[in-house]
Amino acid sequence: FVEATQDVGLDLFNKPNQTSLNVGDLDNDGDEDVFIQINDWTGDDIEALLLNDESEGVRSFVDVAAYTGMTVQGDRKGSAILDYDMDGLLDVFIPSLQYGSILYHNLGPETPNNWIGFDLWGIQSNKDALGSWVTLYAGGKKQVRYTKAGQTWKLQDKPYVHFGIGQATSVDSVVICWSLGNKQVLINPAINQYHKIEESSGTDVLLADIQEPQKLILAQNYPNPFNPTTTIHYILAKTEDVTLKIFNVRGEEISTLIAGENKPAGQHSIRWNGKDDHGSKVSSGIYIYQLQAGEVIVTKKMSLIE
């Protein structure tokens, strides 16, 4: 850990008696924001919405509460982030002795961003899936959520796992590691909706919301980064001759996993053991995997670590 409070501008936010703090991606841009509810016992109680933003390679938090309509002052005791109308935009609820309650309905940014959410149901693990890790790969970015009972003072928080994905138009894959260790991988789940996911009895790969794909789909390999092996999943819209190759970043061919084999429509997977065609283990680094089905070619990157 490196102390970065000053680097991201949080040292400028020094209001007293910050009685609850919530984290969530309120603008669905793929970066989690911070909501702080303030009660200073003087009647000037208000809140701060710290937007997580990156500009020219510098990441910082900026208080935008006053500009977004969060202007109600008065008694408040704790707060919660939840999507009460299930529209994919996280809202803010604050219990108040003075008002009874304060509910800030999130209308989203001027340019809407995409999102995805999951309603996890434990079977072997606890029913509410507490203690589960959910990892999402979309738009070249990796996001992670940890499910727990509550994130703030006096109140539980949203029961759903929520991700903003910005302007990405699809999700490569989602990896759910349940609290008892079972893993499930969702390939290319539909965006801008919530998915109810029940825990499987072991490691599993699910074809989420794609029964008849209209195009070739190449999923992000899992795990990634990996060592020593990884699995590549792909989906064919129709029966095709398939070739799958691995290249290094210099464009040199490392390994051919599938060489012009005729494959039926549907979901397929293949493992790579991190070795070249001569059986020698390759060095750590970035590699490109390229799938050709008929005349269509798609590629993705993966990382091998020591």
Image (spheres, helix red, strand yellow):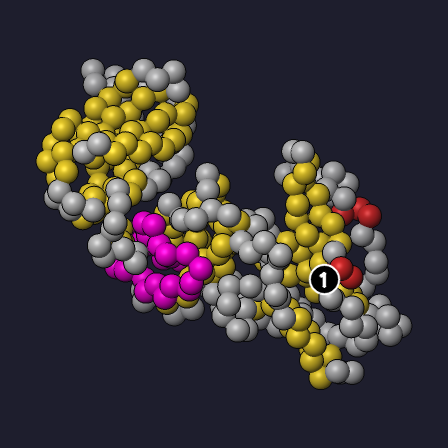
Left or right of 142 on screen, residue 176: left
In percent of width and height, residue 162 lies at 49, 59
| Residue in the picture at 60% in, 61% down | 108
Q: Is residue 184 magenta?
A: yes
Picture layout, residue 287 above or below residue 60: above
Rendered-image quadrant of the C terminus = top left
Q: Is residue 74 left or right of residue 288?
A: right
Q: Is residue 236 above or below residue 247?
A: below
Residue at horizontal 38 percent and vertical 31 percent from the top: 301
Characterize the local packing of mark 1: few (<14), some (14-19) or many (20 or more) Cα atoms within 10 angstroms.
some
Most extreme residue toward the right is 42
The type of residue carrying mark 1 is: Thr
Q: Is residue 11 magenta?
A: no
Q: Which residues are magenta?
A: 178-203
x and y percentages locating residue 82 in the rendered image: 56, 68
**Quadrant in the rendering for residue 96:** bottom right
Q: Nearer the viewer, residue 170 or 6?
A: 170
Please give the name of the residue rendered at 25% of the width and 26% of the height, measured from the top-left corner. Answer: 245
Residue that badge 1 annotates: 68
